[in-house]
Image (tube, helix red, strand yellow):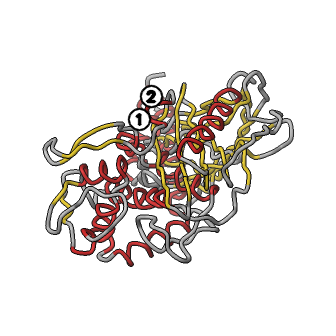
Amino acid sequence: MKRKKIKISFAIVLILLCCLSNVLGASYIYKSNQKERQTDESSIATSVSTPVFEFQSESQILMEASTGKIIYANNEDERLLPASVTKIMTLLLIMEQIDSGKLSYDDKVTCSTNASSMGGSQIWFKENEELTIDEALKAICVVSANDVTVAMAEKIGGTEANFVNMMNEKAKSLGMNNTNFMNSHGIDEENHYTTAKDIAIMSRELITKHPDILKYTSIWMDTLRNGEFGLSSTNKLIRFYEGANGLKTGSTSQALFNLSGSATRNGTTFISVIMRAPSSDIRLQETKQLLDYGFANYENKTLYEKDTVIDTLEISKNITDKLDVIVKEEVSVLNEKGKNIETSENITYRELKAPILEGEVVGNIEIINQSNGEVIENLDLIAKNNIDRSSFIDYLKKVFKMFIMSNQV
């Protein structure tokens, strides 16, 4: 009898303590947590000698897409005319609209008088003619259609001028500090310029955040208008380079020949930008040289796949659930072939207490090069699931369960 009274008293005290904890708002701060990885799993490029190329183009850059690491660059910040490579930003804004649900591939775009009057590369889009967004993307990506580009700009921005403002705002947000757009298509215009580095930045944003675009930029030949109008890609890289999947050509008499080329092999994607090459053949050959160098010397190593659970935590003010913590995007590092270095991961959480919403940022992870202390990546950690605040009933149920279990001892 005495033993039962003690247990009942213990239960009452525990209930009161739980309730008191809930009222006072006690919480826990999860401190940093360091993990080390073996050298065969994570490493970064460190000592490949700087290549020497005898290029005829004026500006070049080679970037690995998933990490954004620049492997080679020459005159990469020189402001030059981009020609139709401009359309990479147009495509980026289109894909943002699609992936956010504001547009669908089956939606229609109607040609305006203004759009139908565009010169240069075109599909002779007639006033009041309609295309689906799917067809419009083919026209822009495969044959660089200026008329369709303007029609899409008007559909999204209301006017092309408004759309160009959106382009420049996006460029600014991406850190494209040497870029200014005056139109959506790239026909030469005063004060319309960008750089090889900025092209690489927007190219990376497009293919890593909106990879569905590669279904269009990798098309070599296709048709529109029920098979009556043939399309043949302006990007010969697609046909003549292993793994090529994009991205955009551009040429005018003033800009000369530009190309942002992308290719993927064995999970590693490189972006090569060539500006002001003297001919189409030369821009193609120089693009191949840069891509060849990248694939010959580097490979991408994945540390964490997208949505990988990094940690599972108990959260203050919740006694029924645990929080799964994930990385929202794939975490990878660039590895010099044949060489590996050790990395460590420093995980830090903010003060965590219920309620916590799915998708909420709960901390960050730093990936550190142990040989020199360099932070390779610094990424947000995200809540995979909702954590609700436990109620009095939840506490009561838990105490009752503990009481029953103690009686079974």
Q: Residue at x 26, y 58 (%)?
A: 103
Q: Residue at x 35, y 43 (%)?
A: 216
How far apart in space, not on screen, are marks 1 and 2 (Cα)? Answer: 6 Å
Residue 211 as seen in the image, left or right of residue 272: left
On residue 380, which mark appears? none
Vertical side of 214 occupied by 110: above or below: below
Amino acid marked by disc 2: Met
Q: Position of residue 130 (x, y in %)?
A: 16, 60
**Location of mark 1 (residue):** 401
Front-lying residue, 44 or 185? 185
On residue 405, which mark appears? 2
Amino acid marked by disc 1: Lys
Q: Position of residue 155 (x, y in %)?
A: 27, 68
Q: Residue at x 35, y 38 (%)?
A: 219
Q: Position of residue 9 (x, y in %)?
A: 50, 44
**Discs 1, 2 touching: Cβ within 8 Å:** yes
Front-lying residue, 144 or 137? 144
Residues packed near mark 2 inside 10 Å, few (<14), some (14 to 19) or many (20 plus): few
Vertical side of 40 occupied by 167: above or below: below
